[in-house]
Structure formats: structure tokens, C-alpha cells
Amino acid sequence: MNTIYDTSEAAGQAAAVEAATLLRNAIRSKGKARIVAATGAAQFHFLKALTAAPGIDWKKVEMFHLDEYAGLPATHPASFRKFLLERLIQPTGMERYHLLDGEGDLAAVCRDTGAALIMAPIDVAFVGIGENGHLAFNDPPADFTTEEPFIVVKLDEACRRQQVSEGWFPDLSTVPQQALSMSIRQVLKSQKILCIVTDERKAKAIKACLQGEISPNAPASILRTHPDVKFYLDRAATSLLDPQKAPLA
């Protein structure tokens, strides 16, 4: 389902309402909730609204995150660990979380975090889409077949340039060339997926992912195969969509 909002703030807030409901319901029915959290500019409004939502017992929420740069310290402004600590973990008092250590032994981090991840189903994954269509840090052409929960990936130039344009790094030479990423197939194993994408910079990727061929060359296009995914988009991000080809609300 695609739902389009006038602004990025409205899209983020609407996604947060749905996310909060899913978390409350999981905690009520199972005594806990397991989530995957994304980072990036499109998640700002979403996480601000979600952390302010009432009635969520965050001590019963266990969080995994999608990706992290290789070799980047957690104190770096672009660190996804820093992002999640400041925008989700600390505001909620969450106690159970698994942060990918990009400074550690990458193979061991993938193995150990992956083992914890697959111990039980993920109730809901919060994801975004990159300017090059990536899902997590699975740049095109993405690996659609590996069953490994986390993998080490090479970042392509388009992905790295996006990080510069968003202000996370001063120039291309300072952006790491490798990252840890949740695999495509692991993302798809989440029971529900909420995909929040905003900004005109993402319009080409949204068109490819929602109206183009499902292909490793448009990694996030694979989301269309998931039985329970909802897209929360702003008008800018959907500006290139053909209204005759996609169900719009």
C-alpha cells in the first residue's frame, strides 16, 4: 500500500502512528516486540513522533538496526550508532538493542548479531530507500539470494555521494567504502515493513522501485513481494510516479 502525504513531516507522523500501534499490540499479545530501525534524514520526523507516542513500554522492545559504516567510530556525526542512540535509544530508555560495531571484526559482528537476530521473528522493520534504490546498504546490483542475516558490502559511488549531499561527510574521500548491512532476504523476513521515503532526491528511486522491474538493480523493488509492507511517502518523493501504474491513496 502506498500512502502519499503533502509533507515529509506528515508522512513521518503517520508512519509513527502505525508503528506505535504495532508495538503496543505486540507487547500486549506476546509481552515483547522486536524491531528493525533505519537511519537517515527521512527518519527524522518518524522517530521524533514515535519516541513521543504514549503507551509503549520501551523496556519490552528489542531493537536491531539495518547497517553501519565500516571503520567509523560511534562518535562520528555520520555514525548510525550515534544516530540511533540520540534519536531512539536514549529518548525512550530502551534497554535491549544490538548496535553494529563497524570498528570491530566485521565477520564476527555479522555472525554474532545475526545469531541474535534470528532467535525470534521481527515484528516490524522500519526502512527507507536510498537515492540509488538501495535497501539498507545493499547497493545495486544487490544480492537477492544470500540467507546470511548480515553481510559486509561495498558502497557504490552514488550511495557515497548521497551521504555527502546530506551533510554527513565533508567530501567523497571521507565516506567509507565498506559497510555492514542486513541482507535483503533478512529484511523480507520481517513480519511487517514500514517504508518511509521523502524528498525529491528520492523520486527517481521511488519510480524505479514501485513502477519498474523487480530487480537487483533497483534493490528496494523487492519490497513489492512482501505480503505486508506499507509505504509512507511525501509528494516530492512521488513526483515522477505515473498515477496510472501505481495504486495511490
Image (cartoon, rainbow, N blue to C red):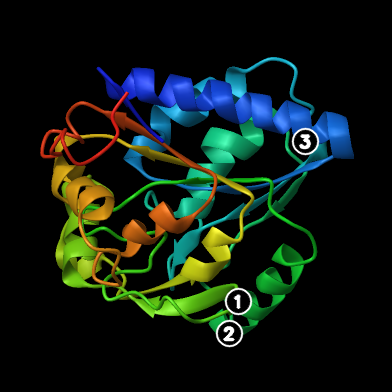
Q: Residue at x 42, y 75 (%)?
A: 144
| 12 to the left or right of 16 | left
The residue labelled by disc 2 is 107
Query: Could you say which is closer to the camera, residue 188 or residue 172?
Result: 188
Is 78 located above or below residue 11 in the figure? below
Q: Percent position (x, y) of residue 60?
A: 82, 38
Instruction: State which quadrant residue 220 falls in.
Output: bottom left
**Sequence order check, earlier mark of 3 and 1:** 3
The three-letter amino acid code for the residue at tag 1 is: Cys
Q: Nearer the viewer, mark 2 or mark 3?
A: 3
Q: Mark 3 falls on what kind of element? A: helix
Q: Residue at x 37, y 68 (%)?
A: 138
Instruction: State which quadrant residue 1 falls in.
Output: top left
Answer yes or no: do the residues labelled 2 and 1 have beta carbons within 8 Å? yes
The three-letter amino acid code for the residue at tag 3 is: Ala
Q: Percent position (x, y) of residue 198?
A: 27, 34
The residue labelled by disc 3 is 26
Q: CA distance from mark 3 to mark 1?
A: 27 Å
Q: Percent position (x, y) of residue 20?
A: 63, 25
Residue 35's disc number: none
**Crowding near the residue tagged with mark 3, few <14, some 14–19, many ≥20 C-alpha atoms within 10 Å:** some
- The answer, for residue 182, to whether it is visible in the render is no
Q: Mark 1 falls on what kind of element? A: helix
**Crowding near the residue tagged with mark 1, few <14, some 14–19, many ≥20 C-alpha atoms within 10 Å:** many
- The answer, for residue 125, to whether it is visible in the render is yes
Is 206 located above or below residue 200 in the figure? below
Q: Percent position (x, y) of residue 137?
A: 38, 65
| 178 to the left or right of 117 | left
Residue 110's disc number: 1
**Sequence order check, earlier mark of 2 and 3:** 3
